[in-house]
Image (cartoon, coloured by chain):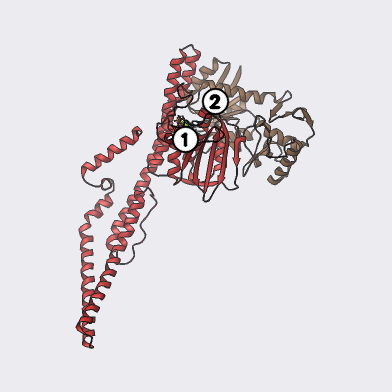
Amino acid sequence: MLRVLLIDDDARLAELLGGYLGQNDVTLVHARDGVAGLRALAGDAFDAVLLDVMMPGIDGLEVLRRIRAGAGGRVPVIMLTARGDEADRVVGLELGADDYVAKPFSSRELLARLRAVLRRAAPEVAGERLAAAGVVVDVGARACLVDGAQVELTGLELDILVALMRRAGRVVPRAALLAEAGRDDVAVGERTVDVHISRLRKKLGDDVGPPRRIRTVRGIGYVMPKEAAEP
Amino acid sequence: MSPPWRRHRHRRRHHHGHHGHAPWAHHHPELAHAMRAGWFVQWRLRRRIFFGFAVAIGVSAGVALLLHHHGVSPGWALTAMIMMLWATSGMLAWRLTLPLTELARVARELGDGNLDARVRPLGHGARELDAIAGAIDDMARRISRQLRDQRELLAAVSHEIRTPLGHLRVLCDTARDAGAPGPLVDDLEREVLEIDALIDQLLASSRLDFGALERRDLDVALEAARALERLGVDASVLDVESDDCRVSADATLLRSALANLVRNAVEHGGGVSRLAVRRGAGEVEVDVDDAGPGFVADDLPHVFESFYRGSGAGAGDKPARGSLGLGLALVDRVARAHGSRAAAANRDGGGAWVSLVLPAA
Ligand SMILES: Nc1ncnc2c1ncn2[C@@H]1O[C@H](COP(=O)(O)OP(=O)(O)OP(=O)(O)O)[C@@H](O)[C@H]1O
Ligand SMILES: [Mg+2]
């Protein structure tokens, strides 16, 4: 049985969703605001968090920031967003929610997304393997295969690559890249990131023609496609 | 066909017309007061015109007599007098109408939806009109406030309506799992989604109808990245071609326009193949390409119309979420509300191309 925490001020939704997820082997625990949610997270272990953006009191974005800043900050979080909100100022890119589902959502789809997010997060302990754009990384062994061939990377390069691959298919802002790589302690500026990226590209055989594995999004950051684009 | 809330608005206007007096006067006592004080303004104006002309005639006649006295022939003296009269009355008329032009400008701007327009100081010799100017300014302030209140109310109400819609959708899936007839639940779910889509449109329309945009500097590249992320589309299709892609636009409207373009490419075109953002002369262009079947040629002239749904492949079988034919209409209205444009075409290599242009910041 998976344990999932829902932080949302809508008690009726919690009840209905709890009923649906209960039939699908997921236990839903409800917290009716951000403070209660953070308290629940501190006191108990959860496999994932469903977090509403629009809440009275501290809003979902602030809650997410505090979750990420606290202990156990890597718990997968799916944001429940409302479309067309006046108060819509989702800064998800910078904050790194694991997924978004727009309200009113289909509970089937939510369940599917939940499982996908858990699949991505679960192997962390037992030799996580990431694959994107023809690159495979064994996080535990710190080994990198490009189109099947072993490639030697420095520690920082591998960390940056892993950060990009964990969020494959999404733009990772330059500033966030170092944080995601767990290297914001190192005194590396955003320009240095560019240098490391160009070295990475060379090693990944991505330095001739337009990049296919690590693409630049001008003014924002970098993105790795989930699947390798045809050359 | 115009959406129901638009029709309602038209009816209301008509209703006001029957009463035979300006609708503003109803809600804006200052203006009504100024109108009642009209006799006073009129009297002051008449007095000024009277004195103005009296002085002009007196001075020109005096000058003519003086000229005649100094030996100028009566014909020339008369001509000089007429010329002087003509020039002074021209100046007088110009001086008198100048403040009116300013009032007219502000009234026109307010009518065009620029509620920040205020009357500039009318200057000396226009004290009579200051009362009217003040009333117009007050009215503009009140309308702005009412609009803002109305928009906040609408946002709150929409949020309240969406809450039970969210419950209904969860119940649909629960019913499916409990063995309820699939097609029935599908129909139910589609109705829920249509109500949701209508609320989206209503929110956007409330901003569009009044031209009440809240312009901010926004980075289109970043907004596009967010739209892709939120709709679960691989962001490596994003191609930012220029360094500065900031626009001056309404965040809510820009986001829903981008979301509609991406959603269309996913729903009708089998996925976004490229989303390009580039800066042109004073504007930023967003291109969304897909590699799907493209638009049916007969549909193309109509795709930006409200409630127009294409006859293309997949139009017959029911899509997973409600399709209202409002997506591109919204995109077009958003573009035009920003004084810009949207376009759609089929690409040479197959697939659809839709572009949205916005004014650069
Ligand atoms: N990328 C595309 N490829 C092919 N056809 C498209 C594409 N985008 C839109 N169309 C056609 O244009 C029509 C109008 O699009 P629009 O977005 O206005 O409405 P919709 O997608 O049908 O409904 P809604 O967006 O309101 O859910 C669609 O019904 C579809 O036939
Ligand atoms: Mg559409």
Residue B29 coordinates in the image, percent (x, y) = 27, 49
| Residue B274: percent from left, percent from top | 58, 36
In depth, the one of A79 and A193 nearer the eye is A193
The crowding category of the residue bearing disc 1, from other C-alpha atoms within 10 Å (few below 14, some 14 to 19, many at least 20), is many
A178 sits left or right of B272 in the view: right
Mark closer to the chain start, 1 or 2: 2
**Picture residue at 52% right of the left edge, 17% below the top:** A20
In the image, residue B223 lies at what x, y percent? 54, 40
Q: Which residue type carries mark 1?
A: Gly
Chain ID at mark 2: A
Residue at the image point whose x is 25% and y is 51% from the top: B32
| Quadrant including the N terminus of chain B | top left
Residue B62 visible in the shown view: no
The shade of chain A is brown
Residue B323 vs B212, above or below: the answer is above
Q: Quadrant of residue A211?
A: top right
The tag on residue A84 is: 1
Query: Which chain is in red here?
Result: B
Task: Kindly tell me whether residue B105 is visible in this rendering.
Answer: yes
**Residue A224 versus residue B137: which sits nearer the camera?**
A224
Query: Could you say which is closer to the camera, residue B231 or residue B152?
Result: B231
> Is B337 placed above or below B234 here?
below
Q: Which amino acid, by three-letter code, is at mark 2?
A: Leu
Q: Disc 2 on helix, strand or loop?
A: strand
Kindly tell me whether mark 2's CB lies below 8 Å from ligand 1. Answer: no
- Classify residue B323 as left or right of residue B60: right
**Residue on which the image places disc 2:** A6
Residue lying at the far top of the rendered structure? B179
Total marks placed: 2
Image quadrant in which you'd find residue B210? top left
